[in-house]
Each structure stands twice: as structure tokens, then as C-alpha cells.
Amino acid sequence: MLGAIIGDIVGSRFEFDETPADNFELFLDKPRCDYTDDTIMTVAVADAILNHRTYSESLHDWGRRYPNPKGGYGNMFAEWLSSDEPKPHNSWGNGAAMRVSPVGWLFDDYHEVMDEAKKSAQCSHLHKEAIRGAQCVATLIYWLRTCRITKEEIESAVKHNFGYELPPLGDIMKIGAEGHFDSSCQETVPWAIRCFLESNSFEGAIRNAVMTRGDTDTKAAITGSIAEAFYEVSDTLYEQACSYLEPDMLDIVQQYYQRMQEDL
């Protein structure tokens, strides 16, 4: 879960305002670095699972608590938040995949992970591509933490189970350098997986995602959520990310890690 939050905060300053350079600083003071809707919605999914809320209720609640995060919300999701009785849109946006990481950590059965990922997506993102993206990310986290699937096995497993082709990292970098920006699940998810596969550390995975440019906070959040299940993440990175969070967010993070300790 904090892997996604770290990626979100690190990537936040590059989505609109800055071009990443080699060896960029991961964290800078607010407002240049800050949490975005990716973090808020990740916390909301965790809250739903930990406190037995519906995904719709929790996402709606947290979105209204924080209506103006850095970068704002996507237009369709902002409309969903503004409704007192929100109905899902036929959206394939990557918001369904960037918030799903708690599902991959808090459920211990493959079929349950797939089902809960679908539920977490379809309350706001009803398109099959959004659901596929959420299920893919949650399943990869589940596989990596329980089956210890190798990197060599991931690409074929992703293609076989979810139908994604993973383009070479060099191609992704080239497209990003040309100013391309796409917030669809069908692009962001396989690109984020490739950023993870071509890394040698958690930090390296986040750096890969940021260097591809475009939707850097969400790409880094998804990459970070997957990488956290494979690599050791330093306490320093966790502490730095938590320093940006609000007290109610930190309360959910604490509940999450207490639950993780109980399940050991």
C-alpha cells in the first residue's frame, strides 16, 4: 500500500510542472511534492476493507474529505464524487488500477483477490478495461507476495491471464519524451509492469516510471504498488512518504500495518 503512496508522491511534481532529470531527488517540500488523488483513493480502498465499508461509500467519503488534491480528480470521477447518489461511469481510466493495491495485500485467496479487485473498480469504473487493470495489479501483488513468481514468469503470466502485451521500456521512454499522455488502464498498467520488470530495486522501479513521463504520479503509484511486493523498501522511504500524509490517512496506514502483523 505504501509502495503506491511513495510512487504517487515522488511522481506528483512531474506530471504537469517539471521534466525529470537523471538522479532526480525523490522527495521535495510541499507543494512541489505531495499526495494526489492516487493516495487518497488507495487509503479509501484500505479503509473499506479494514472497516467493513462498501468501496463506493469509502471512496465517496474520502474524495469529499479531500476535494482539491494536487492535480485534482479526473473529470468523470469528479462528477461521480459530486453526486449524492453516485452511479458508475463506463470509464477505462487508470484510477481503478492505481488505488487497488490494498486488495492484493489484504486478501489471501486468488479468487477473492480477483473478485474484490473487480468490486473496488466497478463502483466507479464500469468498463471492462478498468476492471481488467485493477484485477491485474491486485493479482500481481498477490502472486509476488505469496507465490514469489519470478520476473521471468510475470510477462507470460500477464499475457496469458490478462491479455496485456508489455512494450519495451525504451519504446515507452521514447513515446513519453514526445509528449504523449494517456490515462487509460490499457496503457498505464502494462507500462507500469514493464517499469517494474526492468528495475533492480524499489527505488529503481519508481525512477523508471517517472522517467517515462506522462501520467507520472499514477504510473509510479502502480509501479510502486507492484514493486513493494517484490523488493525490500527502506524505512526511510516509508517515513518520508508518511510525512506528507494527513492524520486520518495515517490512522488507516497504522490500521493496515497492524492487520498485516496480525496475519503473519
Image (tube, rainbow, N blue to C red):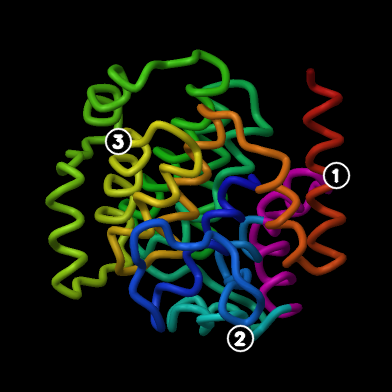
Which badge, 2 or 1, is on the more N-terminal residue? 2
Q: Whole-percent x and y of residue 157?
A: 29, 23
Q: Determine the CA span between mark 3 and mark 2.
A: 40 Å
| Residue placed under numbered mark 1 in the picture | 255
Q: Nearer the viewer, residue 30 or 93?
A: 30
Read off the magenta span. 43-65
Residue type at tag 1: Gln
137 versus 66 height, above or below: above
Q: Is residue 251 above or below residue 63?
A: above
Cα separation, mark 1 vs mark 3, equals 32 Å
Provide the secondary structure element on which disc 2 rests: helix
Sequence-wise first label, 1 or 3: 3
| Relative side of 224 to 246, left or right | left
Q: Label 3 near label 1: C-beta < 8 Å?
A: no
Q: Which mark is residue 82?
A: 2
**Could you tell me how far apart the alpha carbons at marks 2 and 1 are, in whole angstroms?**
28 Å
Q: Amino acid at mark 3?
A: Glu
